[in-house]
Amino acid sequence: MKNCFIVENEEGKRIDRYLAEQMPDMSRSYIQKIIKDGLVTVSEKPVKANYRLSLYESIKVTIPELKEPEIEAEDIPLDILYEDQDIIVINKPKGMVVHPAPGHYSGTLVNALMYHCGNELSGINGVMRPGIVHRIDMDTTGSLIICKNDMAHQCIAEQLKEHSIKRVYYAIVHGNIKEDHGTVNAAIGRHPIDRKKMSTKCKQGKHAVTHYTVIERFGDYTFIQCELETGRTHQIRVHMASIGHPLLGDDVYSPAKCPFKNLQGQTLHAKILGIIHPRTGEYMEFDAPLPDYFNNLLQILKNNY
């Protein structure tokens, strides 16, 4: 795969940093590797990672084809909210990675789906992500839709692109939110320093809007509902942290130490998912019940506050 860029306003910037910003799905170290391998050229000539850009230079990047490992089906129990010939909606548990990636080639939702569905999964996203049209973080629980064929995949992907899918999350955040409801409208992009994080403080972020409503207050914590108008990576986690209310348990975006022992990652649950069915055209809504850990935390907060 080849990517081409024209330098328009980044004069003097290192090429590895520039490309890391232009291709946020790739780490800077990976970009430096392909530069070293001669797969990045400026005006048809290979350069080094510390090359400084000039205006209107033409950059070509050749991304080598990845040798994808064979993914095995695994008999892992699934909490199925709905299933038909086109889609399956799963209530994903905490700690489960959605699709295989370096370091996580087994125990993922895809491994479980391959056992449950066999060959009945869409192939649009390749062998590593069969059926996967969107995802939620490893430690986020709740509703996730998987497509069984390419027709369904294309239809749901278009709804995601148009932001017409209803997605409501429940979360517990640090601090007492004074207003009953509000909206965070702040573009999200790759963090300018820590490439593993997302941030609202970036030059080339994507439009992102989160609407939140307070469900209950517990002194130093607030139980909220968030509805996504867009669906960016880590959107709720980044947006709530940006207004001073990071999610409880979030070890990436929360500076506060979590006071609850054994809490694994952020307290975030994809509660409601609403779609137009790809075959019938009817609106369908799925409601994933809160997991036990979340209900237990709410009970502790009610007892203490």
Image: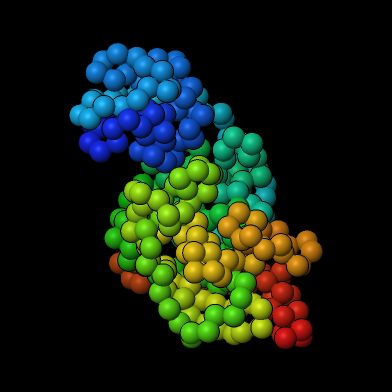
Kindly identify the residue that appears in the image at 20 percent across and 29 percent down.
56
Position of 155 relative to 184 (above/below)? above
Spot occupied by residue 224 in the image (x, y as percentages of width and height): 55, 77
Residue 141 is left or right of residue 9, and the answer is right
Q: Quadrant of the C terminus?
A: bottom right
Kindly identify the residue that appears in the image at 48 percent across and 73 percent down.
226
Spot occupied by residue 100 in the image (x, y as percentages of width and height): 57, 40
* Residue placed most toward the observer, 122 or 262: 262
Kindly identify the residue that appears in the image at 63 percent across and 60 percent down.
255
Spot occupied by residue 160 in the image (x, y as percentages of width and height): 35, 58
Query: Count the marks: how many?
Result: 0
- Residue farthest to the front? 12
Res 253 → quadrant: bottom right
Position of 267 relative to 43 (above/below)? below
Answer yes or no: is residue 278 visible: no
* Residue placed most toward the observer, 125 or 62: 62
